[in-house]
Every structure is written in C-alpha cells, then in structure tokens.
Amino acid sequence: MARWEPNARERLIRAAVELFAEQGYEATTVNEIAERAGGLTKTTFFRHFTDKREVLFSGQEIHSRIMAEAVAEAPESATPLEMVQLALDELASSFTEDRRDIGRRLRTVIANSAELRERSAAKRAALSEALAQALRARGVPRLVADLAAELGARAFYGAFDRWISAADPRALVEYAREVFGELRTAVSVLE
C-alpha cells in the first residue's frame, strides 16, 4: 500500500492533465489517473471528483465565488465596469505561476475533445452568470450587469490564453488588466 501523502486532489489534477496530454482524454481511465497520482485508488479519485471530466473543471465554483465576493466588497461608488475590474484582479491573482504549464497542456487537451470543449463553454457561461448575479445583487440593472459580466468573462479567458502562450514572466493579473482595458476601449468606439 502506498504511503499517505497530502494534496491528493492536486496530484490527481496534475496526473489527469499529464495523461490526457500524453494519450488523449477518451483513452485515459480513472484508474490510470489514480495510479499516476502516486498510487491512489479509484475510490480516492471519486471522493474528490464526480468523473474524469470534472478533474479538469473542478475550480469553477471557487472562481465564481472569488469574483462574486470581489463585487460584493467593491466600494459603493464603483461603476459596474470598475466592479468587474476588481473581480478580474481577484480571480487572476489567485492563479499561481505553476498553473501556467497546466493551462498550456489543458488548452491542447480541451481543443482535441468535443466533450471538453462543450464543458469549457459551459464553464465560461457559468462564470459570466455568477458575475452578472453579483452585479445585480449590487443593484446593477440586468442588461447592464449581463453585458459587464460578459466583458469580464471575455477578458479573463482572453488574458488566460495570452498568459499561457507568453514567454514573458508577467502575472495573469497583468494580462487581465490589459485585455479588459482593450475591451473597454473597443466598447467605447462602438457609438
């Protein structure tokens, strides 16, 4: 029996991403992921994740909570876009440098699987909706909240793509500010 080691959840995520990158999502089994994670069992895997797809998307509720809390804590004087900027800053700041390599591998794995592309789109929509709900809770009208949240989600995913593709050492939060600024400029010239 393998000696107990901490961070089983993180080890399972890393093992899954490695195996999916090596042999494909469809060809990888839960047993292989558990074994690669340091001799864990299938039972341990299912204590942490409902299925092998969820191992890649498990942080969604945490990301939504981070953004919603940032909006809730924004100053009363903040505009909807300022609240979104604060939410982006908080979410992007939660991504450590070690997530960059995982993100690179994950992007390729998702691109090669229709099931994962569909799940990724659902994750993006859920993040946008969580942000819109937080804005509405602050009294922002529905249409304005929905539009601001969609800009925020677009900014986050655009920044994430730049961050995992870049060779420079800038943090994700810097990319998020850059992309959100570009989107704000683009919106301002629509009239």
Image (tube, rainbow, N blue to C red):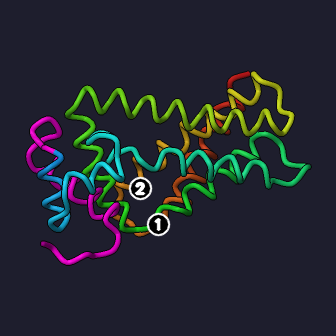
Magenta span of residues: 1-29
Identify which residue, 35 or 172, lies in the foreground. Answer: 35
Q: Which residue is mark 2?
A: 163
Where residue 24 appears, x then y in whole percent? 13, 41
- Residue matched to label 1: 170
Q: Amino acid at mark 1?
A: Arg
Rendered location of residue 133, percent (x, y): 71, 34
Q: Quick check: 168 left or right of 182?
A: left
Q: Quadrant of the C terminus?
A: top right
Q: Is residue 191 magenta?
A: no
Label 2 CA crowd tier, 10 Å (few <14, some 14–19, many 20+): many
CA gap between label 1 and label 2 equals 8 Å
Q: Residue at x 85, y 48 (%)?
A: 78
Q: In the structure shown, which secondary structural element does the residue marked by tag 1 occupy?
A: loop
Label 1 Cα crowd, 10 Å radius (few <14 / some 14-19 / many 20+): few
Dividing the picture into quadrants, the one containing residue 13 is bottom left
Q: Earlier in the sequence, mark 1 or mark 2?
A: 2
Secondary structure type for disc 2: helix
